[in-house]
Image (cartoon, rainbow, N blue to C red):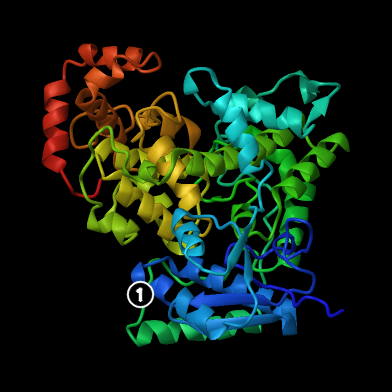
Amino acid sequence: MSRRKPRTHLIFGDQLGPRFTEPGADGPDEDAPIVMIESRAVFRRRSFHRAKAHLVLSAMRHRAAELGDRVRYVKADTYREGLARTKGTTRTTVRHPTSHAAARFVAGLPDADVLPARGFLVPREDFAAWAAERRGGALRLEDFYRWVRRSHDLLMDGGEPAGGRWNFDRDNREPPPKGRPTLGAPPPWTAREDGIDEELRRDLDAWERAGDVSFTGRDGPRLFPASRAEALAALDRFAEHRLAGFGRYEDAVLAGDPPMSHSMLSAPLNLGLLDPAECVERAELAWRGGGVPVASAEGFVRQIAGWREYVWHLYWHFGEDYRRRNVLRHRRSLPDWFAALDADAVAARCLSTVLAQVRDTGWTHHIPRLMILGSRALQDGWDPAQVTDWFHRNFVDGYDWVMLPNVVGMSQYADGGLMTTKPYTSGGAYINRMSDLCGGCPYRPAERVGDRACPYTAGYWAFLHRHRERLSHNHRMARPVAGLDRLTDLPELLEQVRRQGRSAP
């Protein structure tokens, strides 16, 4: 009796780890031939950061080299054209993709069997069951995070959270050490480019010269892992040398030390090169071995098993219409200087510094994203859909499922509180406390009006005034909104913000 011919298995550019190709009851067939498609149209439709395009394509080509004769790597204009070139007599399997658009594409394939998603701790059906049990339909990260910790026996001791607390946020919110330009942490893992990177850089240069595509940002050396071996080395480096110092200063910012003690593992995680289970298990092992404080281990586990997992599931739970949420009715288009990553056009040192980091590397950690970039967009009333697209295109770890909830819900409060309990924005005092970015700035964080008025301080009060009616009913915002009545210079402040309009702060 002849053996059935294995079905071809299609993998996308963010499904590059071994778990996406390993056979099993819910996996591809044993010895299934692999198809990978490098679509130039993806980069023609939108201007992605050059560093992001390089990383994704380098990771795809490295994976193809690892798979050898088992893979057919097709360079095509579109996915459909690429699939047409590989059409055979067998059906195709594919892991559930990570975006609504890709899911629609896969659903339209006449001969595709869609396998369960990989790369996350919680199956989608388990999240749906958990969400259905929430009274009143309210979903909150803390509830989800504790459920994940219990169900996966993660950082638990005899049914209780390790260290006696679920949450070590109070220990993990310290400002940076005074008078130090860097945290002094051991440096993160560093990539060594190879022949694949060299060939890819030539290809990208040729695409640009031909006018076929255009990129944002600068083309620096590759900073992030592009293979499974590199990703594991980066995880080792973080767990052994950097995790211990992570928690205490995870919300702090230093101009001369963008990585601080952050793992910088989001990019390989979102490419599928690392699995979240191995990351959190490694952090727990480091703590149990005595080399890492529980607060640092918990802070990292919260990022992976809490926030990252939560964002993934909310992306599907809220549905595709979520991207059109805009309860604050913010309609302003992104200013040219922001869209072009023109850090030199900006006088405010915090914004200029962070915009330059994005321009040069395609990365900055979560506090600059939220409290400097996102806060500027929120205070100025930029269209949340445009802000989401900007983050998606310009960050090496940015994908639709990542940025849609993070920007629409967390950063821009465009969903009116479905995801978070309040808008996340602040005046210059917060930036001054949590960073060294206010030193050397022409503006002063404590000043609201005048030539030295901090654009974040003035913008914060203008934002509260603009949405006073809505925010006064929010229990976490009622006190700040009431503070508007104490501002004797509010009319002058609002007029100054209005005059400044679209100019770079």
Kind of residue sitting beneath label 1: Ser
Crowding around mark 1 (Cα neighbors within 10 Å: few <14, some 14 to 19, many 20+) is: some
Horizontal relation, residue 230 to residue 219: left or right: right
Q: Residue at left 74%, top 74%?
A: 6
Residue at the spot of label 1: 214
Reply above or below: 104 against 123. below
Residue 189, image x, y percentages: 69, 60
Q: Name the quadrant of the C terminus.
A: top left
Q: Residue at x 61, y 42 (%)?
A: 124
Whether residue 245 can be seen here:
yes
Work out whether residue 346 or residue 268 is closer to the camera in this orientation and state it. 268
Quadrant occupied by the N terminus: bottom right
Residue 128 x/y as whole percent: 58, 35
Q: Is residue 223 visible?
A: no
Q: Which residue occupies 59% across, 42% down?
A: 308
Secondary structure, mark 1, is loop
